[in-house]
């Protein structure tokens, strides 16, 4: 696999790449190989959900190559990665498939100097390389080999540089010693691999102490965000960078960075006056560098802004924090009704979490004080944990723990437990960083809990207003679907109903109340009730709409409603329809021909109290299917409504009418990722048999699906 990735990089001219796999049945891509960039830079994207707004997720989900030509395009299309990597580089993401099955994805990186588009040769290289990689992933799956790394992704070693002869090495050393200032070399991870005596003297440290160290860790005054930022910019853009930093007390040093595929060469010289240089920290700092903490904060903040429910917060927190902080497990919990409530976890056994979930809170539970006080706890070893909680049993296999308060609106709402497999010291700088990160999680959790509560209320309201079951009508097969809008509270004004009037007659209705909120849903309930009441007293279709319209104008709801009402006579196989500004129904004949029923469109309900409605009669012979739908099934920005309706008719024509469930599923998948609600009601005419009572009802409350089928 690494050989194949290296070949794609070499032949395409990309300087780096990320290889992802999609395990069978999983809904997320997992990073398994990193090339050309440090692991630390790629860490925030070790796991990418297929729904994430990321190039590789789009490429795999849509099965196409995604090209991002530079910094401005990245910021416009993918603001989350652009916030953390605000550098000039180009990117291509493409799926890895074997046959019709997608097995993973590949991300390739080019310097910011790359042309605005991929060349034909580059596209060919990417296509052929990805086909080969997809085949390798398929072979690994067939052999039962594990696709995911046990710890961290593999790092593809950089290409080997040219080895100088002894004479050349001596000449290079003499050349560097003669130059003013000093020089050093960094590897791809930022560690110093070589430094001249002049450079060591300028930075005020021994050569032996610097080799193998990160500059911002070995030299406290370099632990300022812009130092690490310029290093990252050099790696990602592959362009020279420079910065100036103040070495206490008053020495200004200028650094020039020159990157290539093997590392970074650094030139160090004395700068000018030090007054305009920001002060640097004077003492040693332990834990993550300031730059690293800043990147983690920005990425976590940008990620959590898109988290919707509590489970989203759990998944995003685990995905981002565990690899970034080197922790192996996490638990997100709150206190509810005097008991511990575990909302989610990662890295722990389910049976262990089940034992703690709903446990009464007491001082014997590790971290219980954090839930009450909002003050974090840090335990560098189990001995420290045991001193604080003497009755604790060491059963999680971890060696160090941090229990962090989740603060929202100035009060603790829960706690975040991070666990480390090895002993871990928590110096002051790292404690502050962890507490800041937990603060972001706390705010996101507070919003997510409110969203979940509103979503649950909306779902229960919608379920209460729509019919739980549809009545059995001899000689009629029925399938119904409802999909809420993709955004918001998953509640809206679309409705449908089927009413059995007597042994051989029934009526059906479908409608759409303006809006996607509680007001729309409440009015929808009133409209459905009014239609039902007028239908059961024997009103004709045009009369049902006229009476319902007068009721709505009296209520003056400031919302308008479209509706189609159908009276069905199953003994004579006739239908009578009336419409209040609703999309026209489609009738599929037994021979497959689909007819658009041009029902005279009356005014929307709720506009004019004296509006009159006309009716249309048509045949509904055995084997035919009448499709009633709301505009969310056909309307989409930039799409002509007549064309969209014709497309829907084509789907209806080529779908087996013998299985209305399958037909409904095909039609509902046609919905353009609903920004609007979608309701669909299919009525299949069959032979009428008096007294037939076979009835089967299916209710799926997640999609609010109703099906009535007759053998």
Image (cartoon, rainbow, N blue to C red):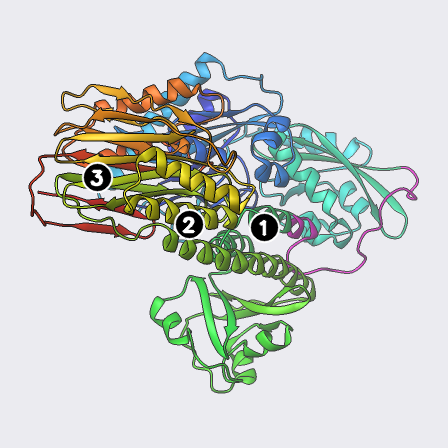
Q: Is residue 274 magenta?
A: yes
Q: Which residue has dot 2 on it?
A: 525
Of all residues, the one furthest to the top in this rendering is 120
Foreground tag (3 vs 2): 2
For residue 661, which numbered disc appears in the image? Answer: 3
- Residue 710 image point, x, y percent: 12, 43
- Mark 1 sits on what residue? 300
Rounded to the nearest angstrom, the CA distance separating label 1 from label 3 is 42 Å
Local packing at callout 1 (Cα closer than 10 Å; few below 14, some 14-19, many 20+) is many
Quarter holding the C terminus? top left
User: First in sequence: mark 1 or mark 3?
Assistant: 1
Q: Count the labels in the image.
A: 3
Per the rendered image, the range of residues in magenta is 272-294
Q: Residue 511, percent across and down?
A: 39, 38
Residue 196 in percent (x, y) is at 73, 40
Residue 596 as seen in the image, left or right of residue 360: left
Magenta stretch: includes residue 83: no
Secondary structure at badge 1 equals helix
Identify the secondary structure beneath mark 3: helix
Disc 2 element: helix
Place residue 63 in its image quadrant: top left
């Amino acid at each position: 696999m690494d050989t194949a990735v290296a070949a794609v990089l070499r032949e395409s001219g990309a300087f780096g790449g990320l290889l992802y796999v999609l395990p069978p049945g999983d809904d997320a891509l997992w990073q398994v190989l990193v090339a050309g960039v440090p692991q630390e830079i790629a860490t925030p994207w070790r796991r990418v959900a297929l729904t994430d707004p990321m190039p590789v997720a789009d490429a795999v989900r849509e099965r196409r190559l995604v090209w991002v030509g530079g910094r401005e395009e990245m910021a416009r299309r993918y603001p989350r990665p652009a916030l953390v990597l605000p550098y000039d580089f180009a990117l291509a993401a493409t799926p890895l498939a074997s046959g019709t099955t997608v097995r993973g994805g590949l991300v390739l990186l080019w310097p910011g100097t790359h042309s605005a588009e991929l060349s034909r040769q580059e596209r060919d290289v990417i296509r052929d390389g990805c086909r080969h990689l997809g085949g390798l992933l398929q072979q690994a799956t067939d052999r039962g080999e594990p696709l995911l790394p046990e710890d961290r992704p593999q790092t593809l070693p950089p290409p080997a540089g040219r080895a100088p002869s002894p004479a050349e090495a001596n000449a290079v050393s003499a050349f560097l010693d003669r130059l003013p200032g000093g020089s050093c070399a960094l590897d791809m991870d930022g560690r110093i691999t070589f430094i001249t005596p002049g450079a060591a003297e300028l930075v005020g440290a021994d050569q032996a102490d610097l080799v193998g160290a990160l500059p911002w860790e070995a030299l406290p005054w370099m632990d300022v965000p812009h130092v690490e930022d310029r290093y990252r910019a050099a790696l990602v853009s592959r362009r020279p960078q420079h910065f100036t930093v103040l070495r206490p007390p008053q020495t200004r040093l200028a650094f020039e960075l020159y990157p290539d595929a093997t590392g970074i060469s650094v030139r160090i010289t004395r700068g000018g006056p030090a007054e305009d240089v920001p002060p640097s920290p004077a003492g040693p700092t332990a834990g993550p560098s300031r730059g690293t903490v800043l990147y983690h904060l920005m990425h976590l903040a940008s990620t959590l802004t898109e988290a919707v429910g509590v489970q989203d917060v759990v998944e995003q927190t685990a995905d981002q924090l565990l690899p970034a902080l080197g922790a192996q497990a996490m638990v997100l919990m709150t206190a509810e009704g005097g008991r511990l409530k575990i909302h989610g976890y990662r890295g722990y056994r389910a049976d262990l979490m089940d034992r703690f979930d709903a446990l009464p809170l007491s001082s014997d539970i590790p971290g219980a004080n954090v839930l009450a006080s909002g003050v974090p706890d840090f335990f560098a070893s189990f001995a420290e944990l045991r001193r604080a909680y003497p009755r604790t049993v060491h059963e999680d296999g971890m060696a160090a723990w941090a229990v962090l308060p989740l603060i929202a609106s100035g009060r603790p709402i829960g706690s975040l437990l991070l666990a480390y497999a090895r002993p871990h010291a928590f110096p002051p700088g790292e404690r502050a960083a962890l507490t800041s990160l937990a603060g972001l999680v706390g705010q996101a959790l507070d919003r997510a809990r409110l969203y979940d509560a509103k979503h649950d209320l909306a779902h229960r309201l919608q379920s209460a207003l729509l019919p739980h079951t549809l009545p059995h009508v001899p000689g009629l097969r029925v399938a119904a679907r409802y999909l809420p809008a993709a955004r918001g509270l998953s509640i809206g004004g679309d409705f449908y109903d089927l009413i059995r009037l007597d042994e051989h007659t029934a009526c059906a209705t479908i409608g759409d109340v303006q809006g996607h909120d509680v007001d729309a849903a409440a009015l929808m309930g009133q409209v459905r009730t009014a239609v039902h009441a007028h239908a059961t007293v024997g009103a004709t279709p045009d009369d049902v709409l006229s009476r319902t319209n007068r009721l709505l104008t009296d209520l003056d709801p400031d919302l308008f409603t479209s509706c189609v009402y159908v009276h069905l006579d199953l003994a004579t196989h006739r239908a009578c329809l009336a419409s209040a500004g609703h999309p026209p129904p489609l009738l599929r004949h037994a021979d497959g021909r689909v007819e658009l029923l041009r029902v005279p469109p009356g005014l929307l309900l709720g506009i004019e109290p004296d509006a009159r409605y006309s009716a249309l009669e048509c045949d509904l012979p055995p084997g035919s299917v009448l499709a009633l739908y709301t505009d969310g099934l056909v309307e989409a920005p930039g799409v002509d409504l007549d064309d969209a309706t014709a497309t829907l008719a084509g789907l209806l024509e080529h779908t087996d009418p013998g299985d209305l469930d399958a037909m409904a599923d095909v039609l509902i998948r046609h919905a353009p990722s609903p920004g609007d609600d979608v309701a669909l009601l299919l009525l299949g005419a069959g032979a009428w048999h008096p007294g037939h009572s076979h009835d089967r009802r299916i209710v799926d409350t997640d999609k609010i699906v109703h099906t009535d089928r007759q053998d």
